[in-house]
Structure formats: C-alpha cells, structure tokens
C-alpha cells in the first residue's frame, strides 16, 4: 500500500494512528515530530505516498506560536510536496475551533485553507477533519483533553476542578478518529453535508455529567459493580480511566469468604449482567443444596472433578452431571430444581458461577433443600 508519512508522530493522535498503521500489510510508516530537524522533513516527503499531517500547536506559551506551529509548518510541508512533483494525498487534523474567532482557531482555519489550495492546484486528494475534543489512551492530562485530566486525576485520587459544570463538551474517541483516517487513506471516508470528511460518532454532555461518570469508576472495585458498558461513552471512558491507573495499582483484592469447605468470592455484579463469583471446594465437600423460584445460574468447573446433582422439588429422581476441568462444559441451573455440586476428586475444585441477578439479602430467592 506504499509509504505513509505521519507528522506529529509522537503526539496523542499520532501514536494511536501509527499503532493501527503498523498492523496493515505493505505499509511503511515514516515519522516526523517536533524533535526532528526540519531538514529531514524533505527527505521523508520525497518518499511518501500519503501524508497524515497531525503536527500542530494547541497550548503554547506565546500565542504567536499558533501561527508558527499550525500555519508555518503546514506551509513548509506543502511546499515540499509541490517540489516533489507528485500529487500526494494529504490528510490534516484540524479542529472545530477553526469556526471560532480565537488565535488557535484562526491558525487552524488558515492551515485548512492552505491544504485546500494545494488540493485544487495539484489535483491531489485532501482530507480536512475538523475534530472536536479527542479522548482516548495516551492523551496527556492538562494538555490534550479535559477527559484525560478528569481520568488521570480520578485514577490518582486528585480533585477535579470544574468552574462551570453546565458547560457542554463535544467529544470524539481516538479509535473512531483513527478508523476514519484509515478510511480516508483508502479513499472512502464519511462526509458531511458540506462534503468535508468527518467522524460520524461523537458525544455531547456537560462537564458535570462527565465528572460524575468518571468519578464513579474507583468505587466499582469495592462494589464489584460493572460500569454500564452497553453505553458506548461509558465503556470508552472506563477504558480510558483504566489507562491512567498507577502501574502498581492494576490489581486489587476480592472480599473472600473462607471456611473449612474452601472459599467463595464475588468477582463482578450488575443489574444488567447478573453476578459472577468463583469458589474453591475441598475434596468430598458439597456446596449448594438449595433451589430458586426465578433466579438461574451457570456452573463451570475449571479445575478438578465434581458432580452437579438436581432434583425437581416435587420429584424423587436425582439427575447427575459429572464435570471436570479437563473437559470444561457449562451446566445450566433451571429454577424449581434443588441442586448441589460435590467435589468427587482428590484435589480442590475451582468453579466459576454466574447468577442471573446479583444476590439481594432482602430478596435472596434461595431456599435450602437437600437434593
């Protein structure tokens, strides 16, 4: 597929883009970043079959740096592309602030105009993406994104400073950005009504709502509650939050109930997911001997040997299902059957359990009865 040049290769979006480009067959990635000598840019442009222009300035010490970093570098890049004598396709990452009258927005708009002029002059395909606030792994807190700042501070136990919790923020996830960049690379990006390429999936919410969602994540280790991963934004925010955990805090303990039979620990729970827990059962020990009205369960022995027994409440016949970690299979536990699991081997049995609803002491739906 040729050689691809990525400017701003060490930046947040650049790193994510290169990680995906590196998985494509027949693509060679050329890079350019702020620490590279500007003279080296010409050599890389001369080799490139496609350019992703992601380099830019968004938080300078001096506002005049907006012009130098966003306009000046774009001008140099386009001059080098023209000098190559080839109509090299170009994609530039711009910002929705290009529609606003501020120094940063003005510099991004000027860069857009330069890119469009290059496309009209040379006939090269150009793709100008006006992006909202981009969030995702590897973004820098207090620099790239308010989401990065909130996730970083929450993961490190630091306060969130919010001056106006009602202020709306417009977000796009870096994975969706990279997907559309790759679609443009292949010549088929999504486009808006104005004909410009865009990322179709974005999110809008207030700063207060954003802080509230992220602020709930640390408690999930204590409550075992799974975040609402069916919600696309929550799932992506949780993923990003985890990426900011200190490296010595990836693991956390479970509340383990121990007795002579072995031990039992809840792993996860959710109203939508139900409950997952794991147990270790000593040889000869029986667990269960109870039934449920509506709650259902699944048993999966992952180590050791056991037998799962059932008896219908009104019946006398006992049904047996031998299970073994050597040949894993799931046993469904229907309602209205008293059931048990017995360790029939000589080693501990490790069992993964799923219940269709989290255990509620006020309405346990669990009734003792020997099989």
Image (cartoon, helix red, strand yellow):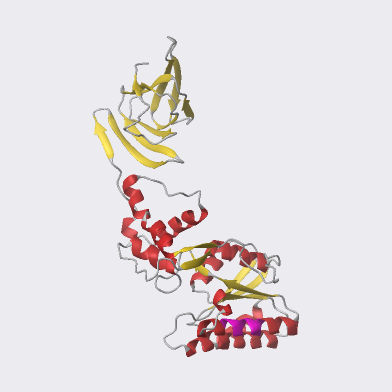
Q: Is residue 175 left or right of residue 298?
A: right
* Outermost residue toward the top in this view: 316
Quarter of the image where one finds residue 111: bottom right
For the record, the magenta segment spans 108-115
Residue at horizontal 52 percent and vertical 74 percent from the top: 9
Q: In this picture, is 311 found above or below 67? A: above
Q: In this picture, is 252 found above or below 139? A: above
- One can see residue 123 in this view: yes
Q: Residue 136, how many percent across, how many down?
A: 48, 63
Q: Residue 160, how many percent across, how many down?
A: 34, 66
Q: Residue 226, how many percent across, how many down?
A: 41, 46
334 or 99, which is in the foreground? 99
Please identify the quadrant where the C terminus is shown: top left
319 or 346, which is in the foreground? 319
Please identify the quadrant where the N terminus is shown: bottom right
| Predominant SS along the magenta part | helix
- Please check the rendered image and state whether residue 313 is part of the magenta-colored stretch, yes or no: no
144 or 330, which is in the foreground? 144
* Outermost residue toward the left in this view: 260
- Please check the rendered image and state whether residue 109 is part of the magenta-colored stretch, yes or no: yes
């Amino acid at each position: 597929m040729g050689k691809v040049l990525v400017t701003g290769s060490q930046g947040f979006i650049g790193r994510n883009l290169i990680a995906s480009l590196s998985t494509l067959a027949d693509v060679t990635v050329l890079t350019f970043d702020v620490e590279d000598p500007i003279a080296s840019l010409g050599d890389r442009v001369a080799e490139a079959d496609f350019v992703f222009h992601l380099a830019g300035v968004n938080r300078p010490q001096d506002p005049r740096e907006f012009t130098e970093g966003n306009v000046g570098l774009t001008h140099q890049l386009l001059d080098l592309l023209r000098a190559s004598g080839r109509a090299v396709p170009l994609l530039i990452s711009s910002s929705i602030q290009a529609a606003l009258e501020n120094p940063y927005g003005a510099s991004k708009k000027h860069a857009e105009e330069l890119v469009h002029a290059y496309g009209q002059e040379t006939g090269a395909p150009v793709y100008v993406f006006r992006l909202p606030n981009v969030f995702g792994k590897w973004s820098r807190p207090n620099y790239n994104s308010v989401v990065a700042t909130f996730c970083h501070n929450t993961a490190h136990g630091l306060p969130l400073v919010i001056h106006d919790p009602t202020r709306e923020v417009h977000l796009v996830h870096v994975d969706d950005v990279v997907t559309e960049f790759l679609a443009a690379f292949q010549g088929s990006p999504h486009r808006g009504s104005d004909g410009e390429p865009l990322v179709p999936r974005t999110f809008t919410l207030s700063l207060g709502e954003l802080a509230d969602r992220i602020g709930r994540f640390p408690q999930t280790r204590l409550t075992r509650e799974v975040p609402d991963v069916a919600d696309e934004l929550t799932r992506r925010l949780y993923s990003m939050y985890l990426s900011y955990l200190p490296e010595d805090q990836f693991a956390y303990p479970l509340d383990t109930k121990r007795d002579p039979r072995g031990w039992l620990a809840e792993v996860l729970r959710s109203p939508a997911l139900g409950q997952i827990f794991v147990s270790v059962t000593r040889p000869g020990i029986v667990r269960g001997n109870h039934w449920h009205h509506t709650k259902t369960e699944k048993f999966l022995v992952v180590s050791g040997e056991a037998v799962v027994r059932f008896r219908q409440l009104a019946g006398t016949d006992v049904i047996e299902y031998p299970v073994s970690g050597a040949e894993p299979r799931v046993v469904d536990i229907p309602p209205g059957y008293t059931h048990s699991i017995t360790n029939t081997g000589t080693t501990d049995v490790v069992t993964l359990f799923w219940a269709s609803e989290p255990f509620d002491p006020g309405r346990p739906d669990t009734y003792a009865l020997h099989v």
